[in-house]
Amino acid sequence: MQLQFNPKNIKKMKSITMKVLFLIARNRVSNTNKCVIKCRITFNKQRKEFSTGLFVNPDNWNSKKQKVLDKESQHEYLNTHLSLITTKVNQAFLMLKIKEEAFAVGDVLSALLSTRSFYNILSHLWDCAQNKLFIKQALKILI
C-alpha cells in the first residue's frame, strides 16, 4: 500500500518542534564577575536544562540574539561553542524523531549526552578552563 500526499491532511498534521535556548544564571555570579551559560531544551511543554561549562560577563550577553557580545574577549570562541551545542541538540532530536517512537525531552537530553562527540566538547571546554587556571596560577607565582 502506497501512502499518498493529501493536501487536506496538512492541517491535521501536528508539527513536532523543539526549542533550544541559552540563558545565563544571573543569580550566580562568580568572583570574576562571570555567569555560567545554560542550555534549555523545550519539547512538548517540558523543559530540561544543563550547564554548557561556558562563562560570560552578564553585561556582555545578548539574550535576544543568544550570543556573546563583541566586548567579551573570547566572544568568537564562546559563540562557536554555543552554535556547536545547538547543532548537537538538534542532531539528537532528529535521531529520535527518525525512530518514529514516542519520546520526551529527557530522552533528547539522554541521547545528547550519550553521544561521544558531546562528551568531547565538554571535555575540551573543561581542559581549556583548567589550562587557563593553571596559567593564571603560574603567572602569579612568577610575578
Image (tube, helix red, strand yellow):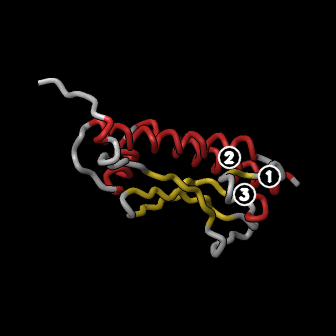
Residue furthest to the left: 1
Q: Which residue is mark 2?
A: 78
- Residue nearest the observer in this picture, 106 or 138: 106
Expressed as whole percent of the image width and height from the top left, the position of residue 143 reads 88, 55
Name of the residue lying farthest toward the bottom: 27
Under circle 1, the secondary element is: loop
Measured Cα–Cα span from mark 1 to mark 2: 9 Å
Residue 18 rendering spot, x and y as whole percentages: 43, 51
Instruction: Tell me which corner region of the image, top left, top right, bottom left or bottom right, holds residue 84.
Output: top right
Q: Which amino acid type corresponds to the residue marked 2 in the rendered image?
A: Leu
Local crowd at mark 2 within 10 Å, few (<14), some, or many (≥20)?
A: some
For the point 27% across and 51% down, which residue is it?
103
Residue under numbered circle 3: 62
Give the spatial CA distance, label 2 vs label 3: 13 Å
- Inspect the image, locate mark 1, and give the three-letter code of the amino acid beneath it: Glu
Q: Which residue is mark 1?
A: 72
Residue 127 placement (x, y as % from top left): 59, 45
- Sooner in the amino-acid sequence: mark 2 or mark 3: 3
- Name, please, the residue furthest toward the top: 2
Check if mark 1's residue and mark 2's residue have beta carbons within 8 Å. Answer: yes
Q: Residues within 10 Å of mark 3 (few under 14, many from 20)?
A: few
In the drawing, does residue 10 fall left or right of residue 71? left
